[in-house]
Image (tube, rainbow, N blue to C red):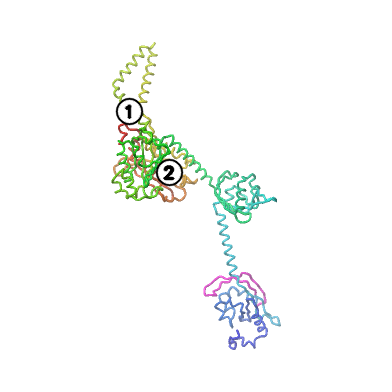
Amino acid sequence: MAAYNWADHPLGLPQHWDPLLLAMVNTLLGSAESSYLVWGEEMWFFSNDAYRPVLGPRVADAVGTTLPMLWADAWPAVRSMAGRAMAGEASSVSDFHIRMARYGVPEDTWWTFSYSPVRDARGRVAGFLCITNETTGAVTTAARLRSSEAQWQALFDALQEGLLVGELIRGEDGRIDDFRLEEFNPAWQRLSGIEDRSVKGRTVREVFGQVDSYWIDMATQVVERQAAQSFVRQFGATGRSYDGVAQPLGGDRFVLVFSDVTDRVRSEQERSDIEQRRRLAVEIGDVGLWDIDLSTGTLDWDRNTCLLFGSSESSRPKLSDMIAAIHPGDRPEFERRFAAACDGGEVFEMKFRVIGLDDGIERRASMKGVSLREGEGNGEGAGGGHSAGLLVGLHRDLSGGLHRGGAPVRFVGAVRDITRRVRNEHRRATLNNELAHRMKNTLAVVSAIVSQTLRDAPDVESGRLATIARIRALSAANDVVMTGHRNAATIRSIVEGAAAVHDQGRRIMFDGPDLTIGARSALSLSLIVHELATNAGKYGALSVPEGRVKLAWSVEQDGGSGAPMLSFHWAESGGPPVRRPKSRGFGTELLEMGLADSGAGRVRIDYAVTGVQCHLTAPLAEVTNDGDALPLPDEVAPDA
């Protein structure tokens, strides 16, 4: 300020200034407060060193200028207050917003300052003094905190999981028998059935009355051990199940975060019941399951398979043991089909004879299986050459085709002991053959029955009734011999039965004509629907209340051959977004096996985001044929 050329300034040299101006400038320069002085009607501007950070790049232009010129960008915001100060009115503001461009870019700033009029000896206003402090940092920080708090509060309120902050209540003896509800979100109110927010600050026992001591004990352990604890527990006040975690917050405080998993718990129980029923069905139905690891040649089979192959339950079988147990007359065909299934991915299916490994008993088996290749199932892939080496005894040319689509690593399937069925069928076939030869004598037999009955009858009416009764008995006997048990059924009864356990809310819609299909196709369809419904109950449309499934079937003409085809379509909607599974499990293999044993059908699975869709087609003639009928004895070994 001293170096400024005041000689050319309207105020003149400082030694000629008004004594009041000199006194005010000296007082200003000696102040530690960020201040400036405005003087005269022109509003000449004077500031001290404490004000220099406010000026920024304008410090070079701050001497000898006026307030409106120096702060032209801020002047509109303070003009009114400056006018009142020059009129003799003092004023002060806090966190006052001023938009300015101190550094060349417009910015929002906030200030706390006061304007105090400066009067001369006669009481006239000669100017005013401003003491100012910038509060931009504090204001913006407070705004960010308010915004952050609002965001967290919105998130807190929007959480679908219940959240409760509690504090343990200790008695005079230090024992804990309750805790106080410090804070909670709307989801906690909804899940716990509490609508009134006035319960905040009250204790659990006050709000819920008799409460399971588990919740208080768990909160106590979390606080005392300062360690999180997860839980899946039913809350007695609501009768529903909750899954969550309790975490310490310091001192006697803790937080509970949980969600309602009642439906999941029920589904898991249902799945457990279904699995138990499945195991019982496998045991009762004499079905054995087996799994071959082709990379090591090890074999894992259940009790039924073990019994069928006449092996002790303590043995550790290998693939070579299974092959050795097959009747020598059936073994070459078994090896050929097994190798073809490994090489080309065909479904393995065959009926053959087995000679028990330990007991030497001959039995009849019906086996079906499929190979899982690298990238399928959950087995680790092995090199094609290694797998081929293990199977060289089955098919010497196998290694040449192993790499198509990845090497087979596992072979899984099921087997059933059909010894009794074959014997019964043999007996039935024998009776049928004999009855066919005796057909020409049937009339003679009937004639003998009639004549003998009438001869011994006391009267005509008694003879008539006795004759009818004996002919009916003969007819019934012929039915027993000539016909066998059939498991064919309508498609509707099959799919409704297979999906019944998953359709408690009647959310599966069935649409299709009444068609009767054969036993084997009925079983395949039942397994497919069961698999689709189970997956929908775990991950898809049936896992949420609003989900729906449409299951439809129809008969269509094949575009190429014109032959009638059964078309079956499963479509989910309204469920969680669908993600394509990362790996192919046995369920996927089951679906892809389809309805047609001959492989003439097609299977398409679409993992659309809106819901899984599965479309199957199969020749109508094949699925309506009762393929579960047993062949004659000479057709059983080898299987044709």
Q: Please say if 447 is above or below 312.
A: above
Is tag 1's residue or tag 2's residue first in the polypeptide sequence?
1
Q: Position of residue 623 (x, y in %)?
A: 35, 38
Is residue 178 something that shows in the picture?
yes
Work out how far the residue at label 1 is from the one at label 2, CA to CA, in angstroms. Answer: 39 Å
- Quadrant for the C terminus, please: top left
In this view, the residue in front, 118 or 193, is: 193
- Quadrant for the N terminus, please: bottom right
Q: Position of residue 432 (x, y in %)?
A: 32, 26
Q: Is residue 351 magenta?
A: no
- Type of the residue with mark 1: Ala
Q: Are marks 1 and 2 in contact (CB under 8 Å)?
A: no
Residue shown at 55% from the left, 73% from the top = 100
Q: Look at the image and give the residue range highlighted in magenta.
A: 86-114
- Residue 424: name its quadrant: top left
Q: Please say if 334 is above or below 201.
A: above
Q: Which residue is mark 2?
A: 532
Q: Position of residue 633 (x, y in %)?
A: 32, 31
The label shown at residue 429 is: 1
